[in-house]
Image (cartoon, coloured by chain):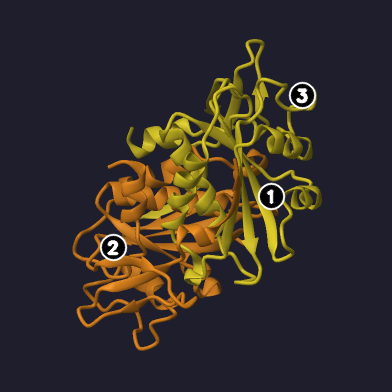
Chain colours: A orange, B yellow
Amino acid sequence: MNLSELIRKNRSYRRFHETERISGSQLEKWIGLARFTPSGRNMQPLKYAGSVSPELNAEIFPNLGWAGYLSDWNGPSEGERPAAYIIVLHDKSISENRYCDDGIAVQSILLGAVEDGYGGCIIGSVNKAKVSRILKLPDHLEILWVLALGKPAEQVVIEDLKDNNVKYWRDMNQVHHVPKRKLDELIYQITL
Amino acid sequence: MNLSELIRKNRSYRRFHETERISGSQLEKWIGLARFTPSGRNMQPLKYAGSVSPELNAEIFPNLGWAGYLSDWNGPSEGERPAAYIIVLHDKSISENRYCDDGIAVQSILLGAVEDGYGGCIIGSVNKAKVSRILKLPDHLEILWVLALGKPAEQVVIEDLKDNNVKYWRDMNQVHHVPKRKLDELIYQITL
C-alpha cells in the first residue's frame, strides 16, 4: 500500500470484531513509529499507556464518548468494542508545550495499525479524571487522547462535503458516511 | 517503502538542493493527502497556502527561525534554501478549536513529500504578522506552521537520547544528529 492508499484506508472506525485480539507487542510496534516522528524543539514530551486486557478495556470503555453527531447511538455494543487502547499522555514534567506533536504521533500510530490490518478512532471526549484513576497515572501525565483500536467491523466512506454540513451519518445499511471539504476549498492559494 | 521506513526517512531537513524545483501540482498532491485525514468533530478548519515561486520564497525566508539549538547557524545559505513552502492555516471562521488536526495534517504532508523523494521541516518560529502580510491573508486565516520543502541536501541520523539532553547537533561532517528517547521511556505501561 502506498501512502495515499494507507491514508484513505485510515478512517475513524468505531465498530470492531472484538474477538480479534491485539497483542502488547503490536501496540509497542505502533508506538515505536511515534518515536521516530518530529517533535517541537525535540522535547518529546509524549508518553503512552496501552491496554490489550479485556478487563481493563471494560473499565476504560464507559468513560469514552462516541461519535457526537450520531445522537441515537451510544457507542459500540458488546462484541463490537475495541480490542485495545492507546492512551496518549502529555508529560508535563518535560515541557508545558507539546506543539503539534500529538497529532503527528496519533496519525503515525493509526497508519501503522491500518497497515497491519487494524484501525481505530481518536477519542477526545474522555472522562480524563476517571481514566487517570483507572490507569493510576501520576499527576504529571495528562491524558490527551484515547485511541480505540481493533479489527474494523464497519464500512466508512468519504463523500464531498455539501452545504457546509460537516456531520457524518449512517445509512440504512450502517455504512458510515463522512463529508470532506473539496481540495479547492482547502487551498487558499498556491503561488507558482 | 513501508510505513516504518517512510517515518524513519522523514527527518527534519533544513538544507536542500535549491535548484531541484517543486511544482504546484506536487504541493496540491501532498495537501490532498491531508484532505483524507481525521479531523476533530470533522470540522476540517485547516486551510493551506503554498509557494513554489523563487520570488515569493525569498520574501518568506527571512521571517523563519531555523534550528534553535544550532546557535551559530542562521539557517540555510543561498543554494540550500527550500524550493517550496506550505503554510498551514487555521480558518477561525470555521472553528476555534483545531484539536490535533494540524499535527495529523503536517505529518501526512511530510510523509507524502518523503515518499516522492523530497523532505522538509515544520517551522514554528515564524514572524506570522509579516508572512500574513506577504501572503495577503484575510484575518480569519491564522498561520500555524510553515513547512519548508525541498530535495534534502543533508544527512540526519537518529541516536538514543542520553542524560535527558534533547538538543540536536551537527558533527564535523555536517551530519545532523537527533537524540530520541528510547521506547521504554515513552511507554508508561502496557496492560496485557
Determine crowd level at label 3: few under 14, some 14-19, many 20+ residues with C-alpha closer than 10 A: few
Chain letter of the residue beneath label 1 in the structure image: A
Residues tagged 3 and 2 counted as in contact (Cβ below 8 A): no
- Inspect the image, locate mark 3, and give the three-letter code of the amino acid beneath it: Trp
Q: Quadrant of the C terminus of chain B?
A: bottom left
In the drawing, does residue B63 fall left or right of residue A122?
right
Establish if A190 lies above or below B14: below
The part of the image, by quadrant, that contains residue B62 is top right
Measured Cα–Cα span from mark 2 to mark 1: 32 Å
Q: SS for tag 1?
A: loop
Determine which residue is flagged by label 1.
Answer: A95
Determine which residue is flagged by label 3.
Answer: B73
- Inspect the image, locate mark 1, and give the three-letter code of the amino acid beneath it: Ser
Residue at position x 25%, y 63% from top?
Answer: A152
Chain letter of the residue beneath label 3 in the structure image: B
Determine crowd level at label 2: few under 14, some 14-19, many 20+ residues with C-alpha closer than 10 A: many
In the drawing, does residue A176 fall left or right of residue A62?
left
Residue at position x 60%, y 71% from top?
Answer: B94
